[in-house]
Amino acid sequence: MSYRSTNSLICSANHPCFGEELPVAKIPLKKPVGVKKKFIKPSSSRTVVPSETTDTVPPFPVEAFPKRIREFIRTTAEALPCPPDIPGSMLLAVAGALIGRKSGIQLKKGWVEYPTLWIAAVARSGERKSPAFATVTAPLRTIQTRLQREYQHSKRKYDSLSPAEQKEESRPKLRQVSTTDVTIEALKDILVTNPNGIIIPVDELSGLVRSHGQYKGGRGDDRQHWLSMWSGIQIICNRKGADPIIIDNPHVCITGGLQPDVLPEFISNECEDGFSARMLFAYPDPIPSRSWNDDVVKKSDEYHSVCEKLYKARAASVLTFTVLAKAEWVKWVNKHRIESTSDNLRATWSKAEGHCARIALVLYHLRKACGETKLPNVDLGSVKGAIQLIEYFKGHAKRVYKTCAIKSDTGRIGNALKWIRKHGGDVTAKLAHQYGLTKTSDEAKELFRILDEQGHGRVTNEARGSVRFRLDDGTTKRRKEST
């Protein structure tokens, strides 16, 4: 079989992945009937797009977790079935939320990290993200149901008091560990009542980004507040006719699923302000279809018990590393800092140290709840597990940003082909620039080159530096235009 192969696919200049060359899949060229040793070009309707999962990514390091948790993750993956990455990654955010502001880790004087984790599991529809999500977040619903009952009991008791007695009592307030209301206005009120923090567990995370500024015509400061919450920076909200809301050390964890098609929307080049760099992505390979089995999730009760321990644990204040753990941490940090990476991943890499410390803190408390450590500070086993996990997330971040670039450029190619057909299928770079297809003539020339390489038509150089592109689908006619 012979192939036609292009060298690369260049990202749009406005995209955060700009400058990276992405491999383009080889397409077999069919031999026309009755013609020997000659090949025709692919039809212009055939867009050559690299597979979003052809690159290799690290497998999920289930061994980084305590033994009881490992068994829960593995059997959840086998019973559904789904990749272990989905329940395993989401579990980190759930545990981080239940620990909350009760515990932090000091890396050095002035640098303290709390277990605030934003984690997205990327998988196509039908890959059982939702069942895995429901299984991992079940303890949150159990705790929240109990808190709701306690609130209703207290409220009935309060409502039965006389007006005079009510003045002597505080009005009951609902305590929360989670919320699905992702508006900043609602979160501020919730955090005032729940200083230990909450988690936003949503099945589909794309709605989170779409909600930014939804009550302000998209022009509000929601994203800035989100960035502050991830960093634990004080939030001050002044409201007309009411006392200001001041939230010290806000703690909000996030977890849920994302479909690959919405990645360009989630990681928008027009508003890349570090929001997506704060998100840890798990983007596993899809698992093959399997026959029905009667496997069930094991250690589910123990997982629920561990979550209860995390929620009810007393405040542990700010911890440090043990001597051996600190040495392992420093060794990894120094290695991480000399790594070279592309510009589009630089922000993600800069957050990796803080993320690794947060994960180490979560693993330490999981290990402690499972009886695997009694040390008063974050131990070596927790740090080693955190390093395994952060290297896993770094590898998957590369896949996410590459997929985002491919899908963004695929949309650009499709729009360009539609525009060229609308204008007769035969256009110059000057026309493309004048009619707004591209920002400059040079950008149009580069676009034409990509279209030519992908087999959509031919580029020709004409007099006075003019560059023309003609679709090659047998239906276009040459458009007369002045150049």
Image (cartoon, rainbow, N blue to C red):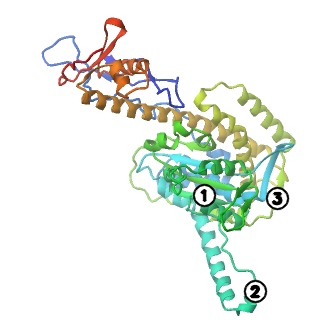
Q: Would you say the residues marked 2 and 3 are in contact, meaning their CB atoms lie under 8 Å apart?
A: no
Residue 167: image tag: 2
Q: Can the viewer see residue 297?
A: no
* Secondary structure at numbered mark 1: helix
Which residue is most to the bottom?
162
Q: Looking at the image, which residue is at 68% across and 75% down?
A: 173
Observer-nearest residue: 104 or 362? 104
Question: Quick one: label 3, few (<14), some, or many (20+) residues within 10 Å?
Answer: few
Q: What residue sits right under mark 1 in the picture?
A: 184
Residue 143: image quadrant is: bottom right
Q: Is residue 226 above or below residue 443?
A: below
The three-letter amino acid code for the residue at tag 3 is Ala
Q: Residue at x 45, y 53 (%)?
A: 128
Does residue 161 appear anywhere in the picture? yes
Tell me the CA gap for discs 3 and 1: 29 Å
Q: Horizontal and vertical percent for residue 457? A: 28, 19
Which residue position is annotated with label 3?
316
